[in-house]
Image (cartoon, grey):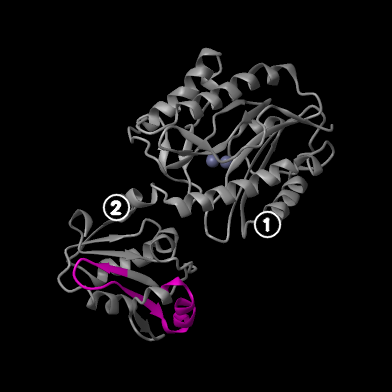
Amino acid sequence: MAAGLDALLVTPGPDLRYLTGYDAVALERLTCLVVRAVGDPVVVVPQLEVAAALASPIGELGLGMLAWGETDDPYALTAATLPGVNRVAVDDRMWAVKALAFRHALPDAEQEAAGTVLRELRMRKDAAELEALRVAAAAIDRVHARMGEWLRAGRTEREVAKDIVDAILAEGHVRADFAIVASGPNGASPHHEVSDRVIAAGDPVVVDIGGTTAQGYCSDSTRTYAVGEPPEDFLAYYGALQQAQEAACAAAGPGMPCEEVDRASREVLEEAGWGDLFIHRTGHGIGLETHEDPYIVAGNRQLLEPGMAFSVEPGVYVAGRHGARIEDIVVCTTDGAERLNIQPRDLAVLGG
Ligand code: ZN
Ligand code: ZN
Ligand code: ZN
């Protein structure tokens, strides 16, 4: 096994889904895939979830299954399959109580985070994963295309977000993960969600939305709209933001360090005099999770490779006034980069 590990312990979450296709819900009872350096992998499953596990892709993989009853100790049962282990990796999302229970059940084993191993696999998407991300991106593009139906003066951010959430589901996601509607001064807070603020004519509105498709892959795209004619001090930076987003997408390609993609967008905004107002990294990887490796941030010297998928989402945030962000999901190809989100990026002025 990689990196001298004796075992990998993976509880329900994106790593389990990645490795087995099993989309189990994380609950207090232990479900755990045990990948061993010596011996075949086994899945520890609560008795009452055996039928669900067998009905999942795990059933087709033919993995050994260890069912445990309500009065059994599933940690001791798992430990018994791992005699003499020294180093075990636990998935990054394992609940602390479970990681601590494993520490107790395997007192001689050193624990580490499985992410250092699994990120190397999950970061590089295969053709089927890229197709799943394309499907997700097209679905969220269709929601942005319908924004004029909902976004107008006199409605609250919360009312607009509710319509967006309905549309995220109607347009091909099984879950709406977030719907940020940040109008006027709220647009200056990058992770503002929604409020009861009534959208006014002349407001710029940052709309950052995403969901998860049936295959488990995520969408995430931002467009900034103007409800009626936007103010001059907003138009003063929107064009530079658009150029910054273009520059980062153009810089992305095989062999390019992640931090250079961040630099490309930051440089444009710095030269235009808005650099201080771009207060976050340029982007994040995306796949079975909305935020995963690789991160497009200063200091990340990871080189882009074909199959890596990530967001390019520079923003400008003017406290007390408004903000703007433009976000597309981009995939590194063999000779450049492919944008999965293709909704127009020119400022869309919707009916005030
Ligand atoms: Zn974010
Ligand atoms: Zn986003
Ligand atoms: Zn994002």
Identify the magenta region.
Answer: 34-58
Q: Nearer the viewer, residue 76 or 66?
A: 66
Q: Position of residue 24 (x, y in %)?
A: 48, 69
Q: Secondary structure at mark 1?
A: helix
Q: Which mark identifies residue 169? A: 1
Few, some or many residues within 10 Å of mark 1 (<14, 14–19, 20+): some
Q: Quadrant of residue 251?
A: top left
Is disc 2 surrounded by few (<14), some (14 to 19) or many (20+) residues within 10 Å?
A: some
What residue is rendered at 45% in x and 51% in y? 127
Is 9 placed above or below 65 here? above
Asked if residue 207 lies left or right of residue 250, the reply is right
- Viewer-closest of 127 and 323: 127
Picture mark count: 2
Q: Residue at x 66, y 32 (%)?
A: 187
**Ligand 2 lies in which image quarter?**
top right
The residue that mark 2 highlights is 117
Three-letter residue code for mark 2: Val
Q: Earlier in the sequence, mark 1 or mark 2?
A: 2
Q: Position of residue 289 (x, y in %)?
A: 48, 52
Foreground pick, 61 / 219: 61
* Residue at (17, 74) in percent of width and height: 83
Side (left or right) of 32 relative to 137: left
Q: Amino acid at mark 1?
A: Leu
Per the model, the C-alpha gap separating discs 1 and 2 is: 33 Å
Could you say which quadrant of the image residue 44 lies in? Answer: bottom left
